[in-house]
Amino acid sequence: MKSICIFIVEDEPSIAQTVQFALDDEGFATEHFTTGTDCLKALENSAPSLVLLDVGLVDGSGFEFFRRIRRLTEAPVIFLTARDAEIDRVAGLEMGADDYIVKPFSLRELVARVRAVLRRVESPPAPVAGGSDIFRIDSERRQIHYHAQPLALTLHEYRLLQTLLNHPERVFTRAQLLEHGWDNPDHRLERTIDSHIKSLRGKLHKIKPDADPICTHRGVGYSLIPGA
């Protein structure tokens, strides 16, 4: 378990120490940074398994640091924040964060969510049935190739496409896709599925303009036909 290292980016010492103690007690290795800048410097030489990122840091917005962190690592990120407004949760999740925990939180819940995110990332996908020459999933790099070209996907785009590929031709409702793509789905966000599907289609279309493997089932949801 000590091989799993978690970066904690939190500028409130009491919160950071409590979180670090709880994770250490569960067998994780942890490193604490009081600023986003220090975390970015560490990422140049280290590869954490997960990042706990405070939204309100002394040297800038956690949302902005998330974008910069994502350029350096594909490790999952969980936001820690005192902001509980829906717009903030939506913003964090649509950016591609893996989870969003509002302060104050219980340590048991935090540890459980950390484990859930790690399980999701580490779980190998089911084999793609058919169309393997068209789509290829690289679970270790969290990458999907389309016609031998890598797709530049956000975390949630990756999860949605992976779900559709693992069950070709199965029709998923928006609620089902939300369950597969988000760790703590809020069904008020179901319509965000449409924007993610639109973005996915755009990225697929750039590689193969004459193909549209994602099918819309009006009033129901979406499916994928790998050979389409």
Image (cartoon, grey):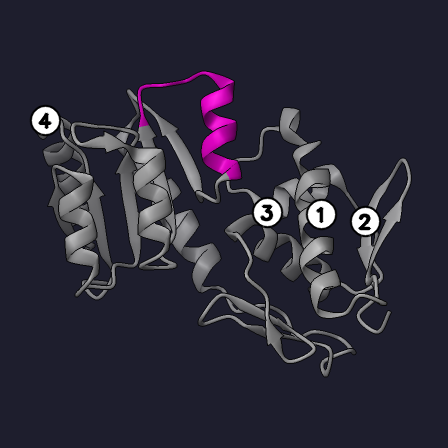
For the N terminus, the image quarter is bottom left
Residue type at mark 4 is Ser
Q: Which residues are magenta?
A: 81-94
Q: Secondary structure at mark 4?
A: helix
Mark earlier in primary sequence (3, 4): 4
Residue at which label 1 appears: 197
Q: CA distance from mark 2 to mark 1?
A: 9 Å
Mark earlier in primary sequence (1, 4): 4
Residue type at mark 1 is Ile
The x, y position of residue 143, in whole percent, is: 53, 68
The x, y position of residue 92, in whole percent, is: 45, 34
Residue type at mark 2 is Tyr
Check residue 181 in the rendering and tell me which mark sits there, or answer none.
Answer: 3
Q: Is residue 189 magenta?
A: no
Q: Secondary structure at mark 1?
A: helix
> Nearer the viewer's eye, disc 4 or disc 2?
2
Residue at which label 4 appears: 14
